[in-house]
Amino acid sequence: MSVITVDGQIGAGGPELGKRVARMFDFDYVDRLALPKAVIDTANGTPPRFADRFWKIVERAVSGFALGNSAGDPYFNTPEEVLLPLTWDSEGPTTAHSRGSEPASFDTLFDLGKTVLVHRAGCLMAGDRSALKVGLFASWDDRVGRVMQREGLKSVSAATDAIKRREKLQLEYFGDIHGVQPDDPGLYDITIDTSAENIPVASIRVARFARESLALQIA
């Protein structure tokens, strides 16, 4: 089983590339909102009724995003007992971080494999397990433009604030907890500048690299 992790700079195209690569291999796609249902069902003996309740809430939240309700709390009024522990990029309820205390559900995810894990510090959590670690980078202007388009923000200042807020959390998590920086190319097996290489082309390059390094077959 294999996992492809995508980290790097905020706004460099992680979700866009991650979804494309996941479709190429018929993998699960995991971003900062939720983990796959399979992980929730199997991690720590989670009862199916709990998982069903969780996914009803997730579906409602996703519908809210589609209707443009993402400006406030992205988790709306989700009860805390149905939220999984979150990594650095969450903007909803968070849990205190300590070195080596990653959620058990992530261990299950790596055991299950066949997942593209985007902006969950997967390059750090993978450890020695089978994973392709992708780092994405881009110019500041391109990052701002992508966040504006992706999140429906109306001004450059709003996108700038969003990126800076998330970068602060990212730097704290990578630096304070793991003693590394997210822009360190040594964290990744492959790095891509999405200002020099568009997302569709970059996705194909990542898929080719994954096929060669992890012996994956494109679906």
Image (tube, rainbow, N blue to C red):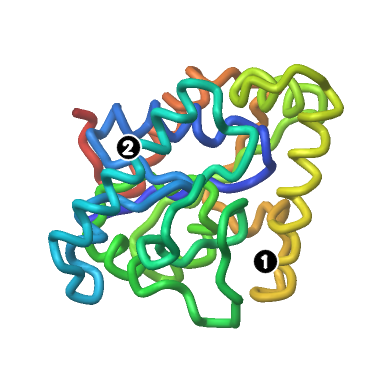
Image location of residue 40, percent across then percent down: 25, 60
Q: In this view, does 124 lie above or below 185?
A: below
Image location of residue 166, percent across then percent down: 71, 48
Looking at the image, which residue is at 26% across and 34% down? 25
- Between 123 and 98, the one lying in front of the other is 98
From the image, tell me which residue sits under label 2.
59
Identify which amino acid the numbered label 1 is placed on. Tyr
Query: Left or right: 139 with respect to 18?
Result: right
* CB-based contact (under 8 Å), mark 2 and mark 1: no
Looking at the rendered image, the quarter that the C terminus falls into is top left
Image location of residue 125, percent across then percent down: 47, 67
Please tell me whether mark 2 sits on a helix, a strand or a loop.
helix
For residue 39, the mark is: none
Q: How far apart are marks 2 and 1 (CA)?
A: 28 Å
Q: In this view, does 124 lie above or below 202?
A: below
Looking at the image, which residue is at 42% across and 60% down? 79
Looking at the image, which residue is at 24% across and 70% down? 43
From the image, tell me which residue sits under label 1.
173
Instruction: Judge depth for marks 2 and 1 and give the one in front.
Output: 2
